[in-house]
Image (cartoon, grey):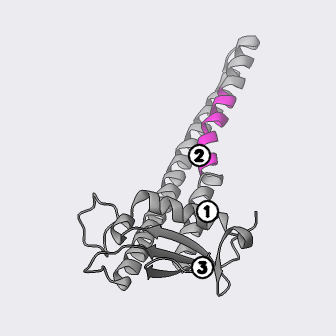
Amino acid sequence: MTARSRYRTEDGKACIDIRLKTSQQLFDGRDPAPFRERGLDEDAVDYIVGEAQEIPAKQPLRIVLMILEEPEPRLGTDDIIEAVRSHFTHEREKLERGLRQHVRRGQLTFVVGLSVLALFLTLAELTSAIPAGHFRQILREGLIITGWVAMWRPLEGLLYDWWPLVETRKRIDRILEAEVSVRHGEPQGP
């Protein structure tokens, strides 16, 4: 199913429609912070992120919050939009910190792995002092293999483990670029 057939569009933007009885449903009820700083409900975040992931990356997004029965006094539209933006801005900042920590940890484990590799390769060379035979050959090969195995995790971390973090950051950036609108009352049209 394509994005055009599955998602409603407005002004060329694929809409992620979220129907809420009240604006309170959008927020994490356990968070005591004021609405602008309050975290969004985990299910709402998962829904927004999941839907944004389904829509082709080249198509712009619009997040439409449809609040059906907002009690008076209403939470201001600007406050709701700011809360959504604040939540995803905070998520992006957490991802940036996580990415920086991952790189630092990867660099540290790489240095440790290289040190272990150098140690084991040196020990493998020192086996030449042992009389020739199967024991020396097995010991030497075992030390070489162990040294290279010690590099496995550091190399995996530096070469591959950061990709999911970067992909998640791209998804969050896309959500932050999306227009957010709040509509009160019953939705119009299909």
* Element marked by disc 2: helix
In three-dimensional space, the C-alpha distance between marks 1 and 3, rounded to whole angstroms, equals 35 Å
Residue type, numbered disc 3: Gly
* Element marked by disc 1: helix
Residue ID for mark 1 = 167
Residue type, numbered disc 2: Pro
Residue type, numbered disc 1: Glu
Q: CB atoms at circles 1 and 3 under 8 Å apart?
A: no
Residue ID for mark 2 = 154
Residue ID for mark 3 = 189
Residue 72 in which image quadrant: bottom left
Mark nearest the camera among 2 and 3 is: 3
* Element marked by disc 3: loop
Q: Residue at x 48, y 82 (%)?
A: 181
Q: Which image quadrant: the C terminus?
A: bottom right
Q: Residue at x 68, y 72 (%)?
A: 57
Q: Which mark sits nearer the N-terminus, 1 or 3?
A: 1
In three-dimensional space, the C-alpha distance between marks 2 and 3, rounded to whole angstroms, equals 55 Å
Q: Residue furthest bottom?
A: 11
